[in-house]
Image (tube, rainbow, N blue to C red):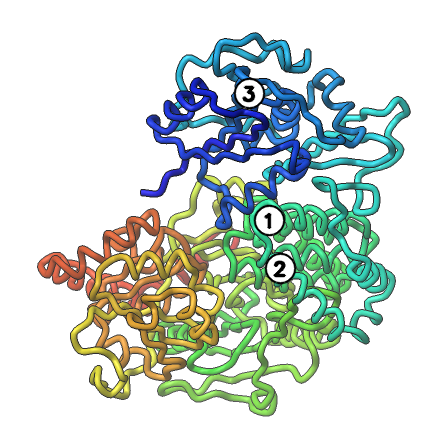
C-alpha cells in the first residue's frame, strides 16, 4: 500500500543537527515519508509557490494524502498556516536552528504576518513546537495556537477541513486567492483602510500570485455575450479555442488545474448572458461538477433574459450532460431543472389554455390512447422500442386503438444558443412521410411533424387533434415533452420515463417510476405542488429484439479460455471510466472485457492501461446483442444512468450482472446484483470467476429476474388500471 502521509520540510540553514535528524527519524518510524526542501532563502521560495511544490512532488494530486509542513522559518510557516489550512492539516515549527525569512515578500504577505486573524478565516490548526522551544518567533496572532510536540501526529485520524469556504483577501485594490482546495462560499477580508469597491472578478483578482485568464478567452466571451449570432458566425474559432483550453485543464497538475478552474469561473462571473452560459457549460462538461450545473440552471431561471425557446434548448443540453455524467447532478440541479421546465411549460400553456378546456371522463373515447414520444428512430434505439412495446400492449392486451406521435422535441435546436459541445437529437426524417408503422403483427397509425419542434403552430394542430378525437388518455414516453404535457389541459397524460430509475420531468398528471418512490423524491414533488397520488410505482419491463444468430467465440475473435465480461452501451466513450476499467482488470487474471457498442477511445484507453490491450476486445456496434451476450460470462456496468435494456438481455441469457447501486441497470437487475463501490465490484467479479456453484445460483436468479422484466403484458395492464382508478383520472 502506498504511503499517504507526507512531511514536507521547508528549511534553511540546518546543518549537522542531531536533534533534527532524530525528529525526522521519529516521523519516519510513525509511517511518514519525509521530503527535505532545503535552501528556502537561497531559492527565494515565496508562499504562493508552495502549491506548485506539491504539484511537482505529487503529479497525481494530493487527494487522499495527509500532508504536514515543517519549517524552521517562523514567518514562512505562519503564512502556510494562514493561506493553506486545507492543504496542510499539521504544521510543525522546528526551533533548534531558527532562520529568518530572507526573501523579498510582496506587501500583502507582510500585512498578513502583522494583521490579526479575521473571524472569517476560522481557527487555525495547532502549530506544534518540535523541540520544546518557545513560540517567540511566530507572529502574535499564531502564538496562542502553538504547543509542544510530544509525538508526531498519527496522520490516521479524520481531521475536518480547517476552513469552510474560500477566503479572499483584498489588499491594495487587488483580490488575492491562495487556497486551491477551497469551498464554494467566498468570504472577503478587507486588509485595506477603504471599503471594498466591487466584487472579485477575473480582472481584479490574483490567484496564488498570478492572473491565469488569457485575453483571447475574455474577448471571445465578451463577443458572444453581446450577440449569439456572432457566436454562430465564429463557432469553429470558439470551439477550437475552448478545446485547447480543455486540453490545458486536463494537462495541468492538481493545484495548477484548480487555480485555472477558479480563474475560468471568475471569467464567467464577468458576464450575464450568453458568455456566462457558455463558460458555465464549458466548466460543467470539462470539470463535471454539479456546482457549475447549478449555476447555469440558476442563470437560466433569471427572468427577463431568455426566451422560452432558449430556456428549452439549454435545458435539453444540460439534461444530456447530466445523463452522461451523473456526477454533474445534485438535488439542487434536479429541482432547478424541474422549475426551469415548468417556466417554459407555463409560458406556452398561457397561449393555449383558453382554447382547450378539460374534457370530462364520460365524454372521452375509452377505446383510444394517443402515445407521444420525443424521439423515434429504429429498433436499436431503446426508447423507440419502449414506445412500440407499449403501443403493442395497449392494442393486444388492452384492446385499445392507438395513435403514435413523435413530437421531435428531444435535444431540439429551436432556441439554439451558445453552449459548449452542443448536440442535436437524431431525427429519422424519412418517417415524416408515412402515416402508419408495422410492428410485429399490428399496424400503428403514426404522425411526425416536418417542422422544427416545439413549434407553437404545430402544437396547436396536435391539440386540435386531441380535442377532436378525445382519447381516454395520452401516454408520454420519456418526459420533458411540452407537446404531451400540454395535452393534459384536456385529458390525463401519463408520463413514463425512459430513465426509469428516476422520476420523469413532467407537468403531467401521472408520473410513472420503475421502482418504489423514496421519501426524498416525494418531498421534491411536494415542493413542486405534486403529491403521492401523482406517482404510480411500477416494474419497468422489456420486450427484446428477437435473436437472429448464434455465434462462437472464434467467429467474434474472442478468446476461448478467458472469462468474458460484457460491457454494452451506445455511449461507452463517456461511460467507461478509468475507475471502472481498474475494477474489472484487477478482479482476476482471466477476466477479459468485451465492449459491445461504439468506442472511439479504445486505442487511447489501451495506451493508458497496459493490461487492457491483452484483456479486452472492442466489437463495435452489434445489431444482435443477444447473440453476442450468449458467448459471454458476465455483464458489468459502469456508473451511468441508462443501460437497463442490455442488462435485462444479459439476465435473460443467463449472465449475472454486476452493477453499482445507481441508475437503470441497478433497478432492472435488482438488489441481488448490486454492489456499493468499485472495490466491491472487483471482489464480486473475482467470486464469479472462482466459485462455479455461486455463478450457477446467480445465473438462475438472473433468468428468474428476466422473466419478471419481460412481463410487459401484466405489468403495463397494472399501470393502466392504476391510472384509470385514480381520482385524478377525471
Do the residues bearing badges 1 and 3 touch, measured as CB atoms within 8 Å? no
Gap between marks 3 and 2, in whole Å? 40 Å
Q: Secondary structure at mark 3?
A: loop
Query: In the rendered structure, which disc, 1 or 3, sits on the residue that comes first in sequence?
Result: 3
Q: Is residue 558 above or below residue 318?
A: below
Q: Is residue 94 above or below residue 514?
A: above
Residue 324 visible in the picture: yes
Residue in front for this viewpoint, 178 or 357: 178
Q: Position of residue 429 (x, y in %)?
A: 60, 87
Gap between marks 1 and 3, in whole Å? 35 Å
Q: Secondary structure at mark 2?
A: helix
User: Which quarter of the image is occupied by the C terminus?
Assistant: bottom right
- Mark closer to the observer (3, 2): 3
User: Which quarter of the image is occupied by the N terminus?
Assistant: top left
Q: Find residue 318 and name its label.
A: 2
Residue in front for this viewpoint, 188 or 51: 51
For label 3, the residue is 125
Give the class, few, some or many, for how many residues have Cα within 10 Å of label 3's Cα (few <14, many ≥20): many
Q: Find residue 333 and name its label.
A: 1
Residue in front for this viewpoint, 68 or 124: 68
Q: Position of residue 623 (x, y in %)?
A: 37, 84
Give the class, few, some or many, for how many residues have Cα within 10 Å of label 2's Cα (few <14, many ≥20): many
Rendered residue at 71%/19% (across/down): 118
Query: In the rendered structure, which disc, 3 or 2, sits on the residue that comes first in sequence?
Result: 3
Residue 716 visible in the picture: no
Query: In the rendered structure, which disc, 1 or 2, sits on the residue that comes first in sequence?
Result: 2
Gap between marks 1 and 2, in whole Å? 10 Å
| In-image side of 640 versus 459 (left or right) | left
| In-image side of 552 versus 300 (left or right) | left
Name which quarter of the figure residue 642 lies in.
bottom left
Name which quarter of the figure residue 282 lies in.
bottom right
Do the residues bearing badges 1 and 2 touch, measured as CB atoms within 8 Å? yes
Amino acid at each position: 500500500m502506498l504511503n499517504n502521509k507526507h512531511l514536507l520540510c521547508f528549511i534553511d540553514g540546518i546543518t549537522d543537527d542531531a536533534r533534527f535528524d532524530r525528529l525526522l527519524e521519529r516521523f519516519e518510524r510513525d509511517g511518514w515519508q519525509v521530503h527535505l526542501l532545503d535552501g528556502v532563502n537561497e531559492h527565494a521560495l515565496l508562499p504562493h509557490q508552495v502549491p506548485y511544490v506539491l504539484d511537482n512532488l505529487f503529479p497525481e494530486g494530493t487527494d487522499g494524502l495527509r500532508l504536514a509542513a515543517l519549517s524552521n522559518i517562523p514567518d514562512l510557516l505562519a503564512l502556510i498556516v494562514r493561506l493553506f489550512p486545507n492543504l496542510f492539516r499539521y504544521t510543525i515549527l522546528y526551533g533548534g536552528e531558527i532562520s529568518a525569512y530572507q526573501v523579498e515578500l510582496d506587501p500583502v504577505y507582510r500585512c498578513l504576518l502583522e494583521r490579526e486573524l479575521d473571524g472569517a478565516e476560522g481557527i487555525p490548526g495547532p502549530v506544534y513546537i518540535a523541540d520544546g522551544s518557545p513560540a517567540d518567533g511566530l507572529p502574535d496572532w499564531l502564538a496562542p495556537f502553538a504547543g509542544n510536540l510530544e509525538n508526531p501526529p498519527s496522520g490516521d485520524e479524520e481531521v475536518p477541513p480547517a476552513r469552510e469556504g474560500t477566503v479572499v483577501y483584498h489588499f491594495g485594490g487587488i483580490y488575492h486567492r491562495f487556497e486551491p482546495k477551497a469551498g464554494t462560499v467566498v468570504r472577503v477580508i478587507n486588509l485595506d483602510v477603504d471599503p471594498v469597491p466591487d466584487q472579485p472578478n477575473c480582472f481584479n483578482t490574483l490567484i496564488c500570485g498570478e492572473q491565469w485568464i488569457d485575453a483571447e478567452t475574455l474577448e471571445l466571451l465578451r463577443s458572444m455575450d453581446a450577440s449569439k449570432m456572432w457566436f454562430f458566425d465564429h463557432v469553429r474559432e470558439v470551439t477550437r479555442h475552448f478545446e485547447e483550453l480543455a486540453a490545458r485543464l486536463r494537462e495541468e497538475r492538481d493545484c495548477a488545474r484548480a487555480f485555472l478552474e477558479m480563474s475560468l469561473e471568475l471569467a464567467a462571473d464577468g458576464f450575464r448572458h450568453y458568455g456566462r452560459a457558455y463558460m458555465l457549460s464549458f466548466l460543467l462538461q470539462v470539470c463535471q461538477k454539479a456546482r457549475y450545473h447549478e449555476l447555469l440552471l440558476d442563470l437560466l431561471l433569471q427572468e427577463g433574459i431568455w426566451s422560452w425557446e432558449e430556456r428549452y434548448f439549454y435545458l435539453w443540453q444540460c439534461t444530456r450532460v447530466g445523463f452522461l455524467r451523473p456526477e454533474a447532478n445534485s438535488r439542487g440541479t434536479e429541482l432547478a431543472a424541474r422549475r426551469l421546465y415548468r417556466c417554459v411549460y407555463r409560458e406556452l400553456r398561457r397561449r393555449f389554455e383558453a382554447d382547450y378546456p378539460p374534457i370530462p371522463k364520460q365524454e372521452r373515447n375509452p377505446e383510444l390512447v394517443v402515445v407521444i414520444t420525443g424521439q423515434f428512430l429504429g429498433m436499436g434505439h431503446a426508447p423507440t422500442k419502449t414506445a412500440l412495446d407499449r403501443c403493442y400492449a395497449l392494442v393486444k392486451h388492452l384492446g385499445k386503438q392507438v395513435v403514435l406521435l413523435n413530437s421531435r422535441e428531444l435535444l431540439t435546436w429551436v432556441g439554439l444558443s451558445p453552449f459548449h459541445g452542443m448536440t442535436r437529437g437524431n431525427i429519422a426524417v424519412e418517417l415524416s412521410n408515412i402515416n402508419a408503422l408495422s410492428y410485429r403483427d399490428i399496424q400503428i397509425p403514426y404522425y411526425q411533424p416536418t417542422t422544427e419542434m416545439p413549434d407553437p403552430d404545430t402544437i396547436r394542430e396536435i391539440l386540435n387533434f386531441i380535442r377532436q378525437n378525445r382519447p381516454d388518455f395520452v401516454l408520454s414516453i420519456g418526459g420533458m415533452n411540452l407537446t404531451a404535457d400540454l395535452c393534459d389541459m384536456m385529458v390525463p397524460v401519463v408520463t413514463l420515463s425512459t430513465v426509469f430509475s428516476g422520476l420523469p420531468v413532467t407537468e403531467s398528471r401521472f408520473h410513472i417510476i420503475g421502482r418504489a418512490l423514496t421519501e426524498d423524491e416525494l418531498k421534491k414533488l411536494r415542493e413542486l405542488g405534486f403529491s403521492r397520488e401523482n406517482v404510480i410505482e411500477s416494474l419497468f419491463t422489456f420486450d427484446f429484439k428477437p435473436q437472429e444468430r448464434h455465434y462462437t467465440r472464434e467467429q467474434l475473435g474472442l478468446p476461448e479460455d478467458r472469462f468474458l465480461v460484457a460491457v454494452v452501451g451506445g455511449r461507452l466513450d463517456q461511460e467507461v471510466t478509468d475507475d471502472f476499467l481498474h475494477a474489472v482488470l484487477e478482479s482476476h487474471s482471466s477476466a477479459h472485457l468485451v465492449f459491445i457498442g461504439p468506442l472511439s477511445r479504445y486505442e487511447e484507453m489501451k495506451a493508458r492501461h497496459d493490461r487492457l490491450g491483452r484483456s479486452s476486445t472492442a466489437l463495435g456496434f452489434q445489431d444482435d446483442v443477444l447473440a453476442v451476450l450468449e458467448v459471454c460470462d458476465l455483464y458489468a456496468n459502469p456508473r451511468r444512468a441508462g443501460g437497463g435494456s442490455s442488462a435485462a438481455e444479459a439476465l435473460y441469457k443467463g449472465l449475472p450482472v454486476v452493477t453499482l447501486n445507481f441508475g437503470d441497470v441497478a433497478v432492472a437487475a435488482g438488489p441481488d446484483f448490486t454492489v456499493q463501490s468499485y472495490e466491491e465490484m472487483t471482489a464480486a467479479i473475482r467470486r464469479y470467476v472462482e466459485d462455479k456453484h455461486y455463478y450457477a445460483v446467480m445465473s438462475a436468479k438472473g433468468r428468474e429476474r428476466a422473466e419478471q422484466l419481460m412481463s410487459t403484458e401484466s405489468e403495463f395492464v397494472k399501470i393502466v388500471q392504476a391510472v384509470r382508478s385514480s381520482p385524478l383520472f377525471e
